[in-house]
Amino acid sequence: MRCLFASDIHGHERRWLALFDAIERELPQAVFLGGDLLPAVRRSAAGVYPVVNDFIRDFLVVRLDELRSRLREDYPAIFLIPGNDDARTHEDALIATEDHGLWTYAHGRIQALRDYDVLGYAFVPPTPFRCKDWERYDVSRYVDPGCISPEDGFLTVPRDQRDLRYGTIEDDLKEMSDCRDLSRTICLFHSPPYDTVMDRAALDGRFIDHVPLDVHVGSIAIRKFILDRVPRISLHGHIHESASITGTWKQQLGATWCYSAAHKGKELALVRFDPDHPADAERELL
């Protein structure tokens, strides 16, 4: 099965157009979009990018509908999740567009794809950024130095205060997947797993209050989940500079192959893979 994976497009039309061209040229059976897909709200307000709702309606929907008209039965299954830079106020628009059949909203769900399953999850551990729509405590209420807890930032959509205070990524993943066989599952995460080539941030030599910052900023819960539940493939984004620092974008964690499509640059980082042959995945900058 031919699959494409992209992440952290951040509403840049050139990257989206590069993806659409690749879909039309390569005719994949499935496309995975790993979050931070839309123009950032703060940049839209400043007039740098289009208004986000207009971008979904007037760009994504229009372009994908045109692509589907040309490809017909070759139009791929598209699975997407938001990322921490995608305001949750636009979640309803992403879900509502499912009725058009252009994509499937994957966050918080496990859905079938041929003889595989797709598990989608958007939340990331606490970051230094103020918007906490898609941030969650990881395995406990610990927050790394320099980061802001989910309770102390702001939300664009209200959340239950108990859930905000006590909910964790670890508990979410357990609830979603408990008692399921994940050996033929493709996981679509925004956060990378902790202490891997995919979560390496440019924090070398930095301190806050004399405390050195951890250069690995991924999720401990996601790492434990992958090692314990052994999905077939795990897809990640979020940390743009990881591949440029480590020199690679994929890693085998236990028996699971993990890929990152995050990229620090103007290009679109496009990962091509076949879940039947996960070691053969390739990545190209377009």
Image: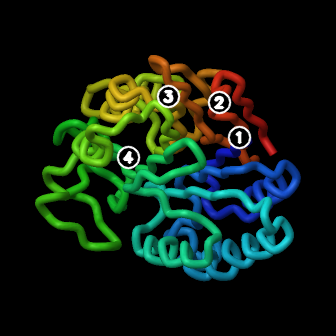
Crowdedness of circle 3 by 10 Å Cα count: few (<14), some, many (20+)?
Answer: many
Q: CA distance from mark 1 to mark 4?
A: 29 Å
Question: Mark 4 highlights which residue?
Answer: 124
Q: Nearer the viewer, mark 3 or mark 2?
A: 2
Question: Mark 1 highlights which residue?
Answer: 1
Residue at the spot 67% in from the left edge and 72% down from the top edge: 60
Residue at the spot 50% in from the left edge and 57% down from the top edge: 81
Residue at the spot 11% in from the left edge and 60% down from the top edge: 162
Check whether the beta carbons of the residues at disc 1 and disc 4 lie within 8 A of each other.
no
Q: CA distance from mark 1 to mark 2?
A: 7 Å
Secondary structure, mark 2, is loop
Q: Quadrant of residue 46?
A: bottom right
Q: Quadrant of residue 138?
A: top left
Check whether the beta carbons of the residues at disc 3 and disc 2 lie within 8 A of each other.
no
Lower sequence index among marks 1 and 3: 1
Lower sequence index among marks 3 and 2: 3
Question: Mark 3 highlights which residue?
Answer: 200
Secondary structure, mark 3, is loop
What kind of residue is marked 2?
Asp
Check the image and name the residue furthest to the top: 254
Lower sequence index among marks 4 and 3: 4
Residue at the spot 76% in from the left edge and 49% down from the top edge: 28
Crowdedness of circle 2 by 10 Å Cα count: few (<14), some, many (20+)?
Answer: few
Crowdedness of circle 1 by 10 Å Cα count: few (<14), some, many (20+)?
Answer: few
Question: Mark 2 highlights which residue?
Answer: 276
